[in-house]
Amino acid sequence: MYQSILKSVSAKEKLLAVLIDPDKFSFENTSSFIKKVNKSIATHIFVGGSIVDENTTDSLVSEIKKQTNLPIVLFPGDVTQITDKANALLFLSLLSGRNSDYLIGKHVEAVYKLSKTQLEVLSTGYILIESGKETAVEKVTDTKPMPREHIQNIIDTAKAGQLLGMKLIYLEAGSGAKEPISNNIIEGVKQELDTPLIVGGGIRSKIQLENAYNAGADLVVIGTAFEEDELFFDDLRK
Ligand code: 1GP
């Protein structure tokens, strides 16, 4: 999976992940939702959320897998969301915060479970940026997002993640964010970064999606816009 992301980045092909949060998603809707995903320009399906019941992820990923050939990537809020039914896992370290549980603690807890799976583990520097309202990530991790005007600090944080060997950097405004990550933040980080750049949170229109791509996002993640209005898929047909 990582190799194919790198290939897309060097070919300047932009990637789009549809995020399914098992906590907000109705299981019975899987088939019709995934049909729409398959007809869209989406290249990946991410599954995960801040608060998800144990075992929900496992059965949901099994069901999704029956209906699509797109790679399924876990975007876990917790160790309980690890399932070997997916293809890969974002091994997220919350670099914007100083809560050691989310920097390294949960990762140590996850190792035994991961050793029982074939998941491709993608080490990801996860940077939460202030976006106008308190987000679930903030509450669950008990950390503060980085102020959006501290661009150099955000760039240095992303760069530190890369120097630590992280394979991906994810700029996160938070699910349902009022404002997506601004173009100048994306541009600034992208200029300094050699790793692929993921951007998500608050992207609700094709224009915002294109803005993020033009600023330098390699992979954009969209969840809420599809949850709220599946007609959004019509704007993103292949
Ligand atoms: C959240 O970046 C993702 O973790 C997607 O956010 O739900 O706002 O699209 P939205």
Image (tube, rainbow, N blue to C red):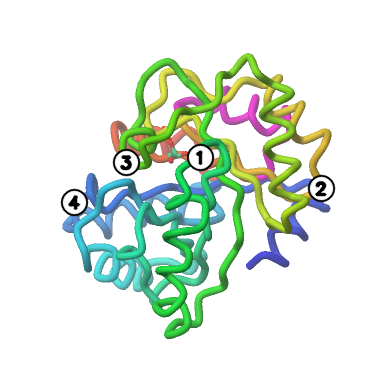
Instruction: Give the camera-side residue of 19 and 135.
Output: 135
Residue numbers of the magenta segment = 202-218
Q: Nearer the viewer, mark 4 or mark 2?
A: 2
Q: Position of residue 96 (x, y in %)?
A: 55, 36
User: Is residue 150 rendered to the left or right of residue 230?
Assistant: right
Q: Is mark 3 on a helix, strand or loop?
A: helix
Mark 2 sits on what residue?
194
Label 4 or label 2, whichever comes before in sequence order: 4
Label 1 or label 4, whichever comes before in sequence order: 4
Mark 4 sits on what residue?
26
What's the CA distance linking mark 2 and mark 1?
24 Å
Q: Which of marks 3 and 4 is in front?
A: 3
Mark 3 sits on what residue?
140
User: Is residue 56 rendered to the left or right of residue 140?
Assistant: left
User: How would you rate the neighbour count of disc 1 (Cα within 10 Å): few for under 14, some for 14-19, many for 20 or more?
Assistant: few
Mark 2 lies within 8 Å of ligand 1 (Cβ measured): no
Instruction: Give the camera-side residue of 143 and 187.
Output: 143
Tag 4 near tag 2, CB within 8 Å: no
Q: Where is residue 213 in the image (x, y as percent from the top left)?
A: 68, 33
What's the CA distance linking mark 4 and mark 2?
38 Å
Q: Where is residue 105 in the image (x, y as percent from the top left)?
A: 45, 59
The residue depicted at 21 percent of the width and 53 percent of the height is: 29
